[in-house]
Amino acid sequence: MYSSIVRLQNTFGFFTTVTFFIAFVISLSDFFSVRTPSVGVLKTTNLQVVRGRPHYYSSKKEEYAIIKFSLDADLSSLFTWNTKQLFVYVTAEWPSAGSQNATNSAVIWDSIITAPSSDHLATIGPIALKKLKKSAGGKPIDPSRGKLSLKNQRPKYQITHPSGQLASQEDVQLKLHYNVQPWVGILTWNQDQDWWNWKALKNGLSKKFRLPALKKKDEGKKKTASTGNRS
Amino acid sequence: MFSSLGNPRQAAAQLMNFGLILSTAFMMWKGLSVITDSPSPIVVVLSGSMEPAFQRGDLLLLWNRNLMADTSVGEIVVYNVKGKDIPIVHRVVRKFGEGPHAKLLTKGDNNVADDTELYARGQDYLDRTDIIGSVVGYLPFVGYVTIMLSEHPWMKTAMLGIMGLVVVLQRE
């Protein structure tokens, strides 16, 4: 009965039980932390539509929208002891031609904000990593990283539509989203309604705007190279 | 030693017990599969393309029902490409249209380019049916055992050997 194998089994069993229980409690603690994300400014600053190819060997020409924008947001309340990273992204959303309901949405800019506790996992160069670690000042939780302030930001992704047409598109809107990645537990996204301690992300939509008509041909050609495979 | 082999009644009970454990595990897995509507409700992360969010060996819980909303941009989905049998965990970055025929484009957070290259030949977008679930829960590192076992086959042999030895040597 009390052989060493049984003892080993019991020890391991107890270890896993305790570990899973602690993990469960940590994941529950998320629900008790108050989240009050807010957006100050989200607006477009420069709009452009150019023609380009999806990749170098393609002969297909598509229209690409380059949307520059400004963003002011305070997401600092999302950083708790169980936050591993915050994924912030801005989408452009617009209705489909023909049907009222169907929408299109595409990410134009995103950013991974690691919590200081996961800085060592960040996939950046050694110098940038050193700087990032220093910025936390030794704190395990650094809410100030959730304060975003972008002025006339270039989009990371030039977006298009499967039809290849995007110029003069009406009713385009930018929307700010976030995804909280925990150390353990459930993944959460921005909400449209309040859920107990978690407040909705208000004001996260820009004004509706219209994309401009296509640029003149000679200007479009210069841009072709840069659209590359980053679509 | 070999005490259980001498007694057929005890040996049968042990066999029964073993079968019960196996069938319970199988039922739990399939039950979870029915609840989440996903053929594989728990997956292990195999690549670093979603770092720093997911590392190799992390365990993900999937949900494959659209009860309140469509699978939308920003969700992390697990999908299968036709002709390839390795499921990929990436984030949806574009969605055109709505409902079951929406066109979805995915990208790994840690990748520079989107997944067009990973899809089947001639496929530019994913369909909802290619997706086997959206990530809703996260448990770090626990699945690393399976990666170890598949990358070092001798560990499988060693583990089976130890388990067999324990069964044989164990005295009830």
Image (cartoon, coloured by chain):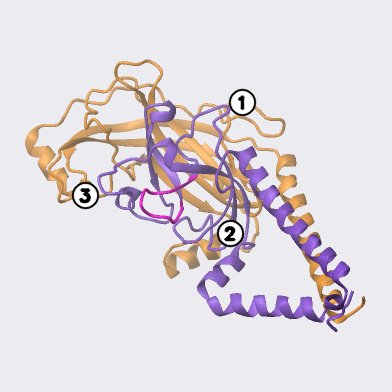
Chain colours: A orange, B purple
Callouts 1 and 3 on one subunit: yes
Which element is circle 3 on?
loop
* Residue type (three-letter) at the residue carrying disc 1: Gln
Whether A184 is drawn above or below A48: the answer is below
Residue B80 in percent (x, y) is at 43, 48
**Residue sitting at x 43%, y 29%:** B100
Q: Residues within 10 Å of mark 3 (few under 14, many from 20)?
A: some
Q: Which residue is mark 3?
A: A228
Quadrant in which the C terminus of chain A is drawn: top left
**Is there CB contact under 8 Å for labels 3 and 2?**
no
Whether A127 is drawn above or below B123: the answer is below
What distance separates the C-alpha of mark 1 from that of mark 2? Answer: 31 Å
- Subunit of label 2: B
Regarding residue A187, the answer to whether it shows in the image is: yes
Q: Nearer the viewer, mark 1 or mark 2?
A: 2
What distance separates the C-alpha of mark 1 from that of mark 3? Answer: 39 Å
**Which disc, if any, is residue A193?**
1
Q: Which residue is mark 2?
A: B58
Q: Relative to A153, is B55 on the left or the right? A: right
Overall secondary structure of the magenta section:
loop
Please provide the residue range marked out in magenta.
B77-88
Residue B79 is a magenta residue:
yes
